[in-house]
Image (cartoon, helix red, strand yellow):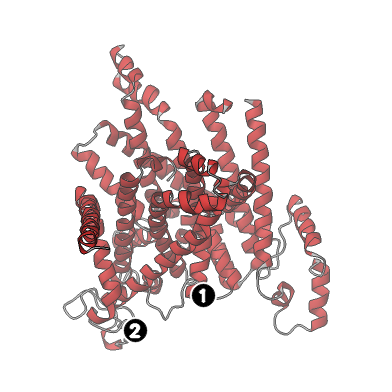
Amino acid sequence: MLTFVARRGLGMLISTLLVISITFILMQLIPGDPAAVMLGSNATPEQIEQLRASWGLDRPMLVQFYRYFVNFLHGNLGQSLFYRRPVLQIIGERAETSTFLGVMALLVVVGVGIPAGVISSLKQDSWTDNALLLVALAGASIPSFWLGLMLMVVVAGKWHLLPSSGFTSVFNTGNLTNLKNLILPALSLGFVNAALVARTARSSMLDVLRADYITTARAKGLAERVVIVKHALRNASIPIITVISFTFASLVSGAVVTENVFALPGVGSLIVQSVLKRDYPVIQGIMMVVAILYVLVNFATDLTYASLDPRIRYH
Amino acid sequence: MTTESSLQVRASESTTLRRAFDATLKFVTKRKTTLSAVVILVALLFIAAFGPTISPYGANKLNLSDRLQGPNITHLLGTDNFGRDILSRALSGTRITLLLGLSISGFALLLGLPIGMLCGFYDRFGIVVMRVVDAMMAFPAIILALSLMAIFGKPGVLNVIIAVGIVWAPRMVRVVYSSTLSLRENTYVEAARALGMPSLRILVRHISINLLSPVIVQATFTFAFSIMEVAALNFLGVGIPPYIASWGGMMNEGRTYIIRAPWIILFPGLFLATAVLSFNLLGDALRDRLDPKLRRIM
């Protein structure tokens, strides 16, 4: 197990390094001079030159990359051009909303997707199965922001059941009921991804349910619930976990638009605002933080596989 | 060539065509879902081709006295806050959506096919490049597309094609790479090598032809995902310029009036979901028909 962790850990470090390099290279492609952008149109050439020198933009590219990398290791992702504050600090302030939204959406994904898939597989080709498959198929094709807008019209606009937008920090106010602002966004974001998990859970369960050990378990007289949960679901879980780890990227993508729809102060709406304001250091910071999180999630998924299925460690 | 043999050639050509036609017909009609997907796609193509001719009003025709009308006889899908006809705008958006989907899949293919093939064929090259490709895939699609749009500096059709194309190219590389890895183990590749065929020629003559199935399937899925992503970019106001009617742009414009006039958002979304659904269904059907083993990598 230790060599497995070491090998995957090394792979993770290489990926992180590549992610940092890619963001650096992409930001070199921006037309024009970042110093000139920051100082605005009234700046004199001397002022621009001074800022370039203080940022090290007049140094060779490799030196710039080295500085950038060292700064990254010190947790310094630069200053926002618009807010004039450290990028990491701004992202940190927005992280709470996005994290709550992500976790709640993931609860929807797991809580709806897996039971739907399992029920579908247990009642293969029945009316329930077909109906669930149809919903899953439609769910995978609906844009989450559109679903969010429609939920907003019906649930918030017509029925007045839940708030339609905004979110106030739970940590700052100590008020857990603020989370109800995230129910509609989490539902719209989660449902679309639950569709994919349901399809995978169904096909994976169908494969497992035909296995001999399931027949044996039933023949031993085990309760059906035990057969399904302990014998079938555990063995069907690897593909399901893969898909759930895929949904991380898809949840992040969806969250960018969903946060915008529901006016939530998260990292997703921050990147959209930064793109509109051309606040490149913030864009760069978010790209890096999200990609590194993705690499970490993949690493965690690999470790989960290895603990669920010991054979994987020896591959 | 004698008349008789040329007739034979023509006859065999027509049987081949006939067989291909029969096989396509059988594929399309075998499953109800495939049939409905194909019917929807044909309808969308028709709308894309003749949209401006069949639509009741101009896509950008303002009519302020008719603003924010619900669906009725004169405006079947209602009007927006400028009195523009939603149906006409949605029909007009079909053409740009399909054109963008096609261009983006083409772009991803143009980058993905050669890179994936070379990576799959030359191990040393593959190990290095595939690491970079995997790192590219660590950026969630919309974040990468948004950042690229910010780097390009302004909204525009070509910029959207390149930005979303770059997002989906690595996924195409992955599919081509894994297919090439298994194709190169085939006996016919070994035979071609033994006969002294240069590697590049093997790639072009033997490998590329056999990559057709996975590439077609992946291009169909790329199409579905990319039109969804383009809609998201347009919805966020960083996609194509607002004077071109697009489904995502229409939904963005309708946000202010969402409670008063939800149809401005409802219908473009339905058009988008239908298009994405039909491409997904077609992709599923093509995958199962052309190569069921692909299920594992797609």
Name the quarter where the C terminus of chain A is drawn. top right
Is residue B37 or residue B71 the one in the foreground?
B37
What amino acid type is highlighted by mark number 2?
Asn
Q: Residue B80 appears in which quarter of the rendering?
A: bottom left
Label 1 – label 2 distance at C-alpha: 19 Å
Q: Which residue is mark 1?
A: B155
Q: Residue at x 54, y 37 (%)?
A: A301
Q: Residue at x 40, y 61 (%)?
A: B228
Seen in the picture, residue B260 relative to A314 is either above or below; the reply is below
Specify few, some or many for label 1: CA neighbours under 10 Å numbering under 14, 14-19, or 20 or more: some
Q: Position of residue A99 (x, y in %)?
A: 54, 49
Q: Position of residue A27 (x, y in %)?
A: 66, 65
User: In the rendered structure, the residue with mark 1 lies on which chain?
Assistant: B
- Closer to the N terminus: mark 1 or mark 2? 2
Name the quarter where the N terminus of chain A is drawn. top right
Specify few, some or many for label 2: CA neighbours under 10 Å numbering under 14, 14-19, or 20 or more: some
Looking at the image, residue A196 sits to the left or right of residue B139; the answer is left
User: In the rendered structure, the residue with mark 2 lies on which chain?
Assistant: B
Q: Which residue is mark 2?
A: B60
What amino acid type is highlighted by mark number 1?
Pro
Residue A173 shows in the view: no
* Element marked by disc 2: loop
Q: Residue B104 appears in which quarter of the rendering?
A: bottom left
Q: Position of residue B272 (x, y in %)?
A: 33, 64
Looking at the image, residue A274 sits to the left or right of residue A24; the answer is left
Query: For the view shown, which residue lies furthest in the top direction?
Result: A220
